Image (cartoon, rainbow, N blue to C red):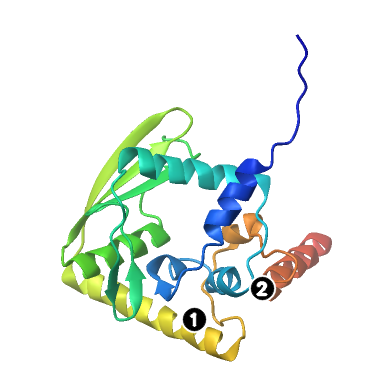
């Protein structure tokens, strides 16, 4: 018997093809994190890394396995919303279970957005932990004020992204979080990421 390791890029290509499928309109998922990434992915999609492909594959697989029903499209205030499953948001993570905080801002943003669209005030978050293999769920109940304030934030971000598409210029501000840049396929030409690198370099050499 003989065997040898080789790089199979079929997975990366399959995930890249899915990510590059044209999506008309602005989705709620375009608004919860970096607006520049959402802008570039629509107008100038870039190849993703091997690590990104694996993480996306895990996320897609978990969602389809737990809730195989087709996603339903809801459009409110020109924002497209496709909940994983009515009243349930599914996530996967490599984070440790111990001291895990489910109240991540972008997860809350998405769940409250779906509450607005569906006319409900509670949502279930199911998180699949990869290592060790485990599933944990939390039920969130939001006030009408929290849901409405969150939706106003979504509308403001929608307008920023809409103007960016009209002007063919990256949006500003984009509300990106620092950790997003570490695995972003837009590295190398995103001005914000270059600025962050320069700032880190100055701090490191000043120390």
Residue at 38% of width from left, 57% of height from top? 107
The answer to whether residue 24 is above or below residue 122 is below
Left or right, 109 with respect to 115, comes to right
Cα distance in 3D space between marks 1 and 2 = 16 Å
- Residue 151 appears left or right of 97: left
Q: Position of residue 52 (x, y in %)?
A: 60, 49
Of residues 140 and 200, the one drawn nearer to the viewer in this rendering: 140
Q: Earlier in the sequence, mark 1 or mark 2?
A: 1
| Percent x, y of residue 68 | 31, 43
User: Relative to the observer, which residue lies in front, 152 or 49?
Assistant: 49
- Point out the residue furthest to the top here: 1
Within 10 Å of disc 1 (Cα), the crowding (few <14, some 14-19, many 20+) is many
Q: Report which quarter residue 81 is drawn in.
A: bottom left
> In percent of the image, x 64 and y 72: which residue is there?
44
Mark 1 secondary-structure assignment: helix
**Quadrant location of residue 176?**
bottom right
Residue annotated with mark 1: 161
Asked if 46 appears above or below 161 in the picture, the reply is above
- Residue 127, image x, y percentages: 36, 42
- Camera-near label (1 vs 2) is 1
Instruction: Name which residue lies at 53% across and 76% down.
Output: 174
- Percent across and percent down for residue 63 are 38, 44
Q: Is residue 160 visible?
A: yes
Q: Are marks 1 and 2 in contact (CB under 8 Å)?
A: no
Which quarter of the rendered picture does the N terminus lie within? top right
| Quadrant of image for the C terminus | bottom right
Residue 192, label in figure: 2
Asked whether 66 or 198 is in front, the reply is 66
Residue in front for this viewpoint, 122 or 101 = 122
Note whether 36 is above or below 9 in the view shown. Answer: below
């Amino acid at each position: 018997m003989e065997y040898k390791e080789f790089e199979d890029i079929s997975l990366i290509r399959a995930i890249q093809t899915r990510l590059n499928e044209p999506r008309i309109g602005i989705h709620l998922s375009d608004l919860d994190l970096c607006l520049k990434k959402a802008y570039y992915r629509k107008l100038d999609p870039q190849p993703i890394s091997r690590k990104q492909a694996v993480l996306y594959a895990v996320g897609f697989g978990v969602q389809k396995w737990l809730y195989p029903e087709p996603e339903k499209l809801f459009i409110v205030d020109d924002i497209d919303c496709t909940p994983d499953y009515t009243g349930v948001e599914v996530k996967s993570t490599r984070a440790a279970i111990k001291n895990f905080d489910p109240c991540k801002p972008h997860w809350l943003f998405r769940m409250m957005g779906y509450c607005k669209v569906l006319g409900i005030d509670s949502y279930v978050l199911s998180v699949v932990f990869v290592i060790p293999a485990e599933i944990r769920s939390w039920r969130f109940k939001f006030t009408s004020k929290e849901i409405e304030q969150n939706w106003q934030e979504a509308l403001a971000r929608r307008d920023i992204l809409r103007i960016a598409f009209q002007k063919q210029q990256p949006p500003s501000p984009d509300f990106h979080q620092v950790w997003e840049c570490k695995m972003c396929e837009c590295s190398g030409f995103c001005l914000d990421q270059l600025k962050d690198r320069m700032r880190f370099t100055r701090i490191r050499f000043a120390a």
